[in-house]
Amino acid sequence: MKLLVINPNISIDVTALIEREARRSISTCTELTMATAPFGVAYIETRAEAQIGGYAAMQIAAEKYEGHDAVMVAAFGDPGLTALREILPIPVVGMTEAALVSACQQGSRFSVIAISQRIQAWYRETIAGYGFSDRLASIRALDEPLAHIGRVQEDQGERLVALAERAVRDDGADVLILAGAPLAGLARDVATRLPVPTLDGVTCALHQAQAMVNLGAPAPSAGSFAALPSKPCLGLPEKLVQLVGRQVLTNRI
């Protein structure tokens, strides 16, 4: 089995964190291909940044998906996830959706622990879009600037644990989700310090990607995720054209 793991932001340090946790979550017969966005932002925390990250993920997937059995979007908030499901003939999983589904299998209400205050609005909208708002106990987030996105765990680990403890004590969380690729692996490290199950989106997504491949469901030929209609397009990378438009426009309409 071969999995393509896409970090839709430009932080190579974060890709390294994702890969370290991903290799703990795959079976011995699974291979990983790691990819980092060639353009965009250091980490995604707004709607606008998510749009940029989603387009970067689409470009990477179009160029690299062939020869892989599934794709994982390795950013909380799942930028580009549903678009990738429309254009790719293989399973696509995202950290957020995977973590939310896993959390709801382990408790009635979950809390999300995040790396910034600004990120909360996008997270709430993403959770609502997946239909899990009624299960959300709280989102608790760090309230100070991040010195280095690749060192959030070292710099802010104790504060993140304290936020998680408050989510259980004050908000009634049955399950905790440590959100965001910069926190990849932290749940594994602090699980014994927290009184309820604590989940990592990378771990959840990798396990679900492997399960989806093993399920062997065929790509849809009807419905809203069937192949896109053919139409002219302009200015897109060649590989993306093949998936999205399939008609190269040499002159403007």
Image: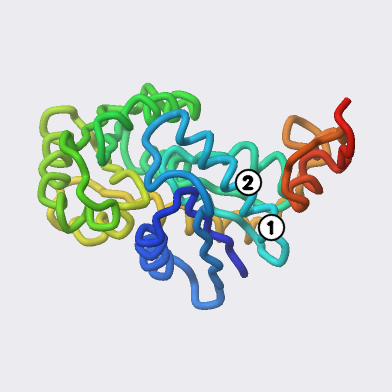
Q: Is residue 151 above or below residue 98?
A: below
The answer to whether 131 appears left or right of 183 in the picture is right
Residue 201 is situated, as x and y percent measured from the top left of the image, at 39, 49
The vertical placement of 97 against 124, above or below, is below
**In this view of the protein, which residue sits in the foreground, 144 or 6?**
144
Q: Residue at x 61, y 54 (%)?
A: 60
Residue 84, position as x, y percentages in the image:
64, 43
Q: Position of residue 12 (x, y in %)?
A: 40, 61
* Residue 220 in the image, given as x and y percentages of width and height: 77, 42
Residue at 36 percent of width and 41 percent of height:
103
The answer to whether the residue labelled 1 contacts the one labelled 2, judged by CB atoms less than 8 Å apart, is: no
Quarter of the C terminus within the rendering: top right
Q: Residues within 10 Å of mark 2 (few under 14, many from 20)?
A: many
Left/right of residue 2 with respect to residue 17 in the rendered view = right
Toward the bottom, the furthest residue is 28
Q: How many labels, in total?
A: 2
> Mark 2 belongs to which amino acid?
Met
Residue drawn at x 63%, y 46% is: 58
Position of the N terminus, as image quadrant, is bottom right
Q: What amino acid type is highlighted by mark number 1?
A: Glu
Nearest the viewer among 177 and 118 is 118
Which label sits on residue 63? 1
Residue that numbered label 2 is attached to: 58
Q: Say which of 136 and 77 sits in front.
A: 77
Taking 32 as reference, is 83 above or below it? above
Mark 2 secondary-structure assignment: helix
Cα distance in 3D space between marks 1 and 2 = 9 Å
Label 1 or label 2, whichever comes before in sequence order: 2
Question: In the figure, 32 relative to 227: above or below?
Answer: below
Identity of the residue drawn at 61% across and 68% down = 2
